[in-house]
Each structure stands twice: as C-alpha cells, then as structure tokens.
Image: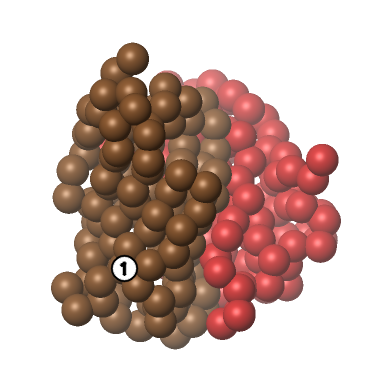
Amino acid sequence: DARVTQTPRHKVTEMGQEVTMRCQPILGHNTVFWYRQTMMQGLELLAYFRNRAPLDDSGMPKDRFSAEMPDATLATLKIQPSEPRDSAVYFCASGPNLSRRNTGELFFGEGSRLTVL
Amino acid sequence: GESVGLHLPTLSVQEGDNSIINCAYSNSASDYFIWYKQESGKGPQFIIDIRSNMDKRQGQRVTVLLNKTVKHLSLQIAATQPGDSAVYFCAEKSETSYDKVIFGPGTSLSVIP
C-alpha cells in the first residue's frame, strides 16, 4: 500500500523555535511538492522538486523557510525561526514524472498540522 | 499571473441529486486540469482530470467539462451521496511552468440526507 508519509502529524511550538517537517514520497515518484493550507489562502504551493532538484520555490518565504531533498526517500521543510502566522497544515505530495504525457495526479500525505504560539 | 479560482465557496445538495462544482482559470497554457477531493483531516485525493484538448471526460459518477473559450471547468457528480461531502479543488498543470500543479481555493460540498 504505497503512500506518502509525513511526520510529525501535529506540532505545537513557540514562536522563534525551529520546526522541521519530513516527507517520504512514494517509491519511484520523482516529483515532490510542498503545499501549505490555511482557511484564508487555501492550498499554496511552497516548493517543487523534480529528481531531487528544486524547480520552483517562489511561493516560499526565503528568509525563514527552506526545503531540501537529501535523498530520493526524504524531503524536508524547515522553518527557522517560526512565527504564529506560519500556523497551518503543511502537505507533501509526490507524483510520477509529470511530463506532457502525464496528467498531474499527485498523491498527498496526511499533512503536518503546525501551531506556533 | 496564473490563477485558478472557484465561483462558489459552498454548495448544499440533497442526497440523490446531481452536484455541479464550477471553476475558472486564467492560464491559457495549462495542459491538464485536475479535480481533487479533500475530506476532513485528510490530504486531497485525485478524482479525475481532463487534458486541454478535450471538452468532456467521464468517470464513475463524475463528469468533467472544459470550456476553453471562456476558461471554465466544471465537475458534475451524479446521484450525490453523503460520502461525497468534502471540499473539492480544481487544479491546473502547465508544462510552461515546469509542470507545477496549482490549486484553486476550493468549494465545500454538503450533502443533505
């Protein structure tokens, strides 16, 4: 049963602390997306990787957010320092090679709910 | 810039009736349009997609219609069931944007038993 795994599922932290969220994409998928979901902004694309290379992180606040793929089985999203406005659900999604012949079907994890006090 | 948006933020439908969820988009270069369903506490789940050179595609109880002239996309759910209650997102993918998948704001569908 292939699925995207995200940890932690829930995280409560204080303003100023570092937060790291992890994602294990589905084996064989070569695209990985990080989205942030809030009531006000919906699903915002933060970062996008293909074959572990960052293709687009224009949606991510560069001063405090960073996204990496140390290897094909792990993607990380780090916030340092965290702020209350970062409170949201962060989703990781993976997909097969998204070329013209493929549809854009992504497989989402269950999300990491972050609360920054 | 690119944007995908929804006409109606909430929709209530009687069980057994058909549901229609609408979406507007602005990027003419998008090559695929995708519908996702998100149930409470879960990640979005793929429902159906349509390629930009098509105008209609049918799945199990769902039909997606694409009108490129007015840049409009719709998802029709036949014989809506309580299990269809969720938030529905349209999304687009464009090869000119490195195949990023961009989501619209979502429509909440409530099915009245």
Instruction: Give the secondary structure at mark 1.
Output: strand
Horizontally, residue B18 falls left or right of residue A90, namely: left
Work out whether residue A17 can be spotted. no
Residue in view at x 32 percent, y 44 percent:
B106
Q: Mark 1 highlights which residue?
A: B66
Residue B91 sits in quarter: bottom left
**Which residue is found at the position 81% from the left and 62% from the top?**
A28
Q: In this view, does B66 lie to the left or right of A111?
A: left
- What residue type is disc 1 on? Leu
In the rendering, at what x and y percent does residue B113 appear? 33, 15
Q: Which chain carries label 1?
A: B
* Front-lying residue, B99 or A52: B99
State whether residue B26 is above or below residue A66.
Answer: below
Percent coordinates x, y for residue A45 in the rendering: 45, 57
Exactly how many numbered labels are in the figure? 1
Instruction: Looking at the picture, tell me which residue is in the foreground, A16 or B84.
Output: B84
Q: Colour of chain B?
A: brown
Quick one: A22 or B8, which is closer to the camera? B8
Image position, residue B93 (x, y; %): 45, 70
Residue B64 position by quadrant: bottom left
Q: Can residue B78 be seen in this view?
A: yes
Give the quarter of the figure containing the N terminus of chain B.
bottom left
Colour of chain A in the rendered structure image = red
Residue neighbourhood size for the residue with mark 1, other residues' Cα within 10 Å, grouped as few (<14), some (14–19), many (≥20)? many
Q: Residue at x 73, y 72 (%)?
A: A51
Which is nearer the eye, A45 or B33?
Answer: B33
Write the residue at 35% across / 73% down: B55
A74 lies left or right of B77: right
